[in-house]
Amino acid sequence: MKHNGLGVVISRMVTLGSNCKIYQGVTIGAGKGGYPIIGDNVTIYSNSTVCGKIKIGNNVIIGANSFVNTDIPDNAVYAGVPARFIKNIVDQG
């Protein structure tokens, strides 16, 4: 089902990698003196907020309704308010 970017707000100063999936109601913007840098293959689920001068690694999943204002390493799942580590993503290939 497509949501066509419904309610998504992304500051023009955000760096967004390739092949990212951003669901409805997501906000990505300024905080802590800067803007997020988001890696490749990142999925940000519905109604999450990502803000500040932080780095989101490659192959990351951010759970629905999460608030992210700290760095997230590659290959990880984070969720919650504030977002916390849930598990590592292991390549099944």
Image (tube, helix red, strand yellow):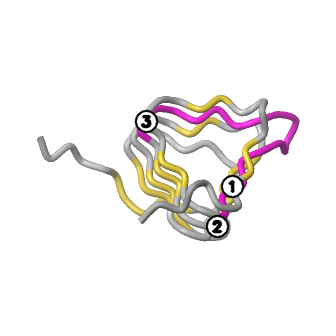
Mark 3, secondary structure of its residue: loop
> In which quadrant will I find the N terminus?
bottom left
Residue at 39 percent across and 41 percent down: it is: 59
Q: Which residue is mark 1?
A: 8
In the rendered view, does 55 fall on the left or right side of 60?
right
Q: Which residue is mark 2?
A: 47
Residue range (magenta): 25-41
Query: Residue 93 location in percent, x, y?
Result: 11, 41
Magenta: main secondary structure equals: loop
In this view of the protein, which residue sits in the foreground, 7 or 80? 7
Instruction: Estimate the x, y position of residue 50 in percent, counting from the top left.
Output: 68, 51
> What count of labels does the image hold?
3
Which quadrant would residue 36 be assigned to in this image? top right
Q: Secondary structure at mark 2?
A: loop
State the image coordinates of residue 23 (x, y, percent, origin top left).
Answer: 54, 58
31 magenta-colored? yes
Secondary structure, mark 1, is: loop
Contact? badges 3 and 2 (CB < 8 Å): no
Q: Which residue is mark 3?
A: 19
Residue type at the position of mark 1: Val
Disc 2 packing (10 Å; few <14; some 14–19; many ≥20): some
Sequence-wise, the earlier of marks 1 and 3 is 1
Q: Which mark is residue 50?
A: none
Q: For the residues carrying marks 2 and 1, which lies nearer the camera in this image? A: 1
Amino acid type of the residue that numbered disc 2 sits on in the rendered structure: Asn
Amino acid type for the residue under numbered disc 3: Asn
Which residue is at the front of the view, 49 or 5? Answer: 5
